[in-house]
Amino acid sequence: MDDKGLEEEFNQLFAEEYNGKTVTSSLKVAAAFNKKHNNVLRDIDSLLKRIAKTSNAPDTFFIKRTYNTENNNRSYPMYLMTLDGFSLLVSGYTGDGVFEKKLKYANMLIEKKVEKEKSKKEEEKPMGNLVIEMNNGHPVLDSREVAEMVGMRHDHLIRNIDHYIEVMSQTPKLGADDFFIKQTYTAGTGKQYKRYDITKKGCEMVANKMTGEKGILFTAEYIERFHQMEEALNSRHNNNVMDIATAKKLVDKFDDTLSLLSKGFETFRDNFNTVIEKQSKIIDILKGFSVEVDKNVNEEDIAPREDEYRLNDVARDFGWFSTSGLPHVDFLKCILRNQLSFNVSTAYEHEDDNTRCVIYLDGTGRNICHLYLKDNGLVLFNKWYEENKGGRTLRHAVTYQHNYRGHKPGDIRDIYYIVPGDKRQRHFRLDTRALLNS
């Protein structure tokens, strides 16, 4: 996907707001990163458990909600997530192209946060501080500032102005542009909304429709501001040199923007360096488990040495067979691991006084693992066997309940073993014929 397509996907991802915050949903994240929604919900639940152990409020990251499908009326769980929650969730995602997508998303998140901070700063201007702008040489007020001044929702003021324009359009002599000039602004979500530049005539019309203290204060404020602007325009030189107040205002805005950008990029750089550092540590760890591929593998290295024994042979010597007739290596490994604390892992190469594991690639490219028991390990195992013979495991016998192929009720049919200390509590079924006399 090219940058333009990725930007469109990002804008669609963060096209919602909740309680004044830009949010996206777990459904959209699952679609953007080609993941199952159940897996995304599982990841979020895991993060919430970790967040609960800190002093952070979970709803600053994730808000639990439900949704209904078109096929039925059932409700299914989902999450809304803030920009911070999104960053926390996708930081652990991997796969083809995911790192590049996260990197570009990070830049877009920084830009969005800068826009929100700028928008928030503009929205927090105190009452009684209306700022007059210029539109085609005419002083105007932003409808958002007017709405804040009079204590009205901006969309309600826009609705009233639309009604004024509709009424004025019925009289050709009245030009609506002399009162209200249609404009747009971009919200923190990236969506565009309608606003108006309100001229002095427009302010008078808005004020005439208002009553009470708010109306009086607004009327006094806009008259004062327009009067100051008119005086400034009358005293300005004809050489079109920008006045000091306007220049200072532009410089202050530019400085604020640079400061926000600088802080945003510093945060991104620190987070990016942290991610790279963690990935480097993971790579270093994985290197310890990597298997060197050698096409000319030495047969002597992978064959058992003089002091080593295959686990198949050991299990066979002790009469431990599975019901398929093969030596029960898993049963032997379970005893070695849980009773003698031997390292019987075949996930990586290792060697100690008791065991040795060798891993190599065969001609088809598959990993082949050989685990050997050394003399020292066999001595310890024999000692343990002699000391625990008969009571080495918890044994459960299953008997025949009816006459069957020469067997009478009560005859042993299967014997199950549970190795003490085995965390998985596995039941091993061994060949009855080899164990009846043990």
Image (cartoon, grey):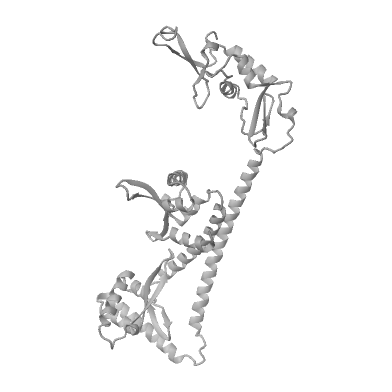
Q: Position of residue 164 (x, y in %)?
A: 27, 79
Q: Is residue 124 visible?
A: no
Residue at image point 61% right, 30% down: 345
Relative horizontal placement of residue 169, taking residue 235 as reference (left or right): left
Quarter residue 227 falls in: bottom left
Which residue is nearer to you in this view: 232 or 350?
Answer: 350
Q: Is residue 119 visible?
A: yes
Quarter residue 314 falls in: top right
Vertically, is 156 above or below 59? below
Q: Position of residue 263 (x, y in %)?
A: 55, 63
Which residue is nearer to you in this view: 96 or 235?
Answer: 96
Name the outermost residue toward the bottom: 238
Which residue is nearer to you in this view: 191 or 71?
Answer: 71
Q: Position of residue 89 (x, y in %)?
A: 49, 50
- Quarter holding the C terminus is top right
Q: How many marks?
A: 0
Vertically, is 354 above or below 3? above
Relative horizontal placement of residue 234, taking residue 352 as reference (left or right): left
Q: Position of residue 125 (x, y in %)?
A: 41, 71
Vertically, is 362 above or below 318? below
